[in-house]
Amino acid sequence: MSDRTLKLTDQRSGKTIDLPLVKGTLGPPGIGVGHIYRELGAFSYDPGFLSTASCQSNITYIDGEQGILLYRGYPIEQLAAQSTFIEVAYLLLYGELPTAAQLEDFRRLILHHTMINETLKRFFTGFYHDAHPMAVMVGVVGSLSAFYHDSTDIANPKHREISAHRLIAKVPTIAAGCYKLNMGEPMMYPQNHLSYCGNFLHMMFAVPCEDYEVDPLAERALDILFMLHADHEQNASTATVRQAGSSGADPFACIAAGIASLWGPAHGGANEAVLKMLEEIGDVRAIPRYIARAKDRDDPYRLMGFGHRVYKNYDPRARIIRSICHEVLESRGGSDPLFELALRLEEIALNDEYFIERKLYPNVDFYSGIIYRALGVPVNMFTVMFAIARTVGWVAHWLEMMADPDQKIGRPRQIYTGPAQRDYVPLEKRTASD
Ligand code: ACO
């Protein structure tokens, strides 16, 4: 809390109240409005939370104007260059970088939980073979609470921690199961001698009748992508996890809610939408036509992978992914026409007044799909890949919220715009206008 306050005056009644400023370590302060309804009889109104901080958090910091992203204070560029996803997971969960011994213990702990209950595997056969993997993810992850109720006492910190580890460990196994369902191939058991990402690649692409060797470049590229996607403060899906958790729902149900929220094309579904958009554009010569559509106020069309609620500068994650794209594509023996198209589309958009004025830059999803494609991941799995990485962030936020003694159920208010009170009209007396 800061000692600075703001004054808010109701001009009709003349009543003035002091609003406290809540200060963090970085970034703008928040105006404490929790008591304005009691004092002035009015709610704050901010659809889409454009100016509303919904909580205090010490996990991730974003400066959207400068294009800065920090996990527990560490710049994303340094983590992507020097860390690993499993270390970042530890950092997000526990707040500090681990020692070598702590990291090894954590790695083993997560590996220990990668198998899923055999009965749970039967869930997959209940879905039709061409079910969208995100639909399967929502269902199967949500069902985990029916299997692991030995760790769902949310008042018990140890239970919360076990659930967190189980989620981080099992979500990749379930994700790979979604892919195998689509492919009509048997699910592969996790291999505990492999890294987190190596194991995921194995569960995705190995088949029981052949040896499978993990490609180190694919493993490292995936590890970097997962680090970049691991957390992003109060985005729609994380806010959903917190909202679901605020009622005391069990952690598996909360993460399933986060997955559902992530699926939308305005959020995690954008990476799938970007690939579809690039395929539809098809040729560099068609770009101006699509740019014109994106700028047309009467056309709901948007350039997918462009724009961000918080970044009004180049998304730092997009910059990192753009350079890995080059590396991965070169290692695969050349370029991808869709990557060439994406580079050209970016160049044209970034020089266009419409995009400059609105500060619309490529976001994390603009290039991630191209790498996934190069790694052999099908388009309908792109958002699932995002969900694997973001599970760490969701879980870290859920743990933070549950440990907060001031945590309250999230219960927003509304401005009612429906009919005023009126009397019920019996059926025989109703006319069309009633
Ligand atoms: N293409 C064309 N115009 C756009 C785009 C776009 N991708 N994004 C925003 N605009 C325009 C809007 O039409 C609006 O123009 P106006 O001021 O003339 O009305 C202006 O820019 C501001 O847009 P808002 O929708 O108000 O911005 P908001 O912060 O609410 O939306 C969002 C952010 C949802 C990401 C939006 O930019 C978008 O839809 N982008 C495409 C989808 C996408 O890439 N989503 C991934 C986000 S990153 C993530 O979740 C990992």
Image (tube, grey):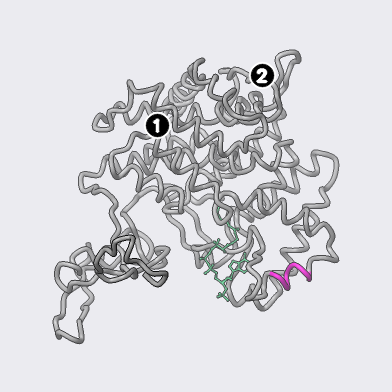
Three-letter residue code for mark 2: Pro
Q: Quadrant of residue 166 in the image? A: top left
- The residue tagged 2 is 186
Q: If the image is split into quadrants, where does the N terminus sit? A: bottom left
Judged from this view, the residue extending furthest toward the top is 209
Verify whether residue 389 appears in magenta: no
**In the image, is 143 to the left or to the right of 2?**
right
Q: Is mark 2 within 8 Å of ligand 1?
A: no
Identify the residue shown where x is 83% and y is 52%.
337
Three-letter residue code for mark 1: Ala
Q: Measured from the top left, where is residue 103 in percent x and y?
A: 46, 28
Residue toward you, 22 or 284: 284
Give the residues drawn in magenta, as a range: 288-293
Q: Measured from the top left, where is residue 60 in percent x and y?
A: 42, 51
Identify whether 241 is placed above or below 199.
below
Q: How many marks?
A: 2
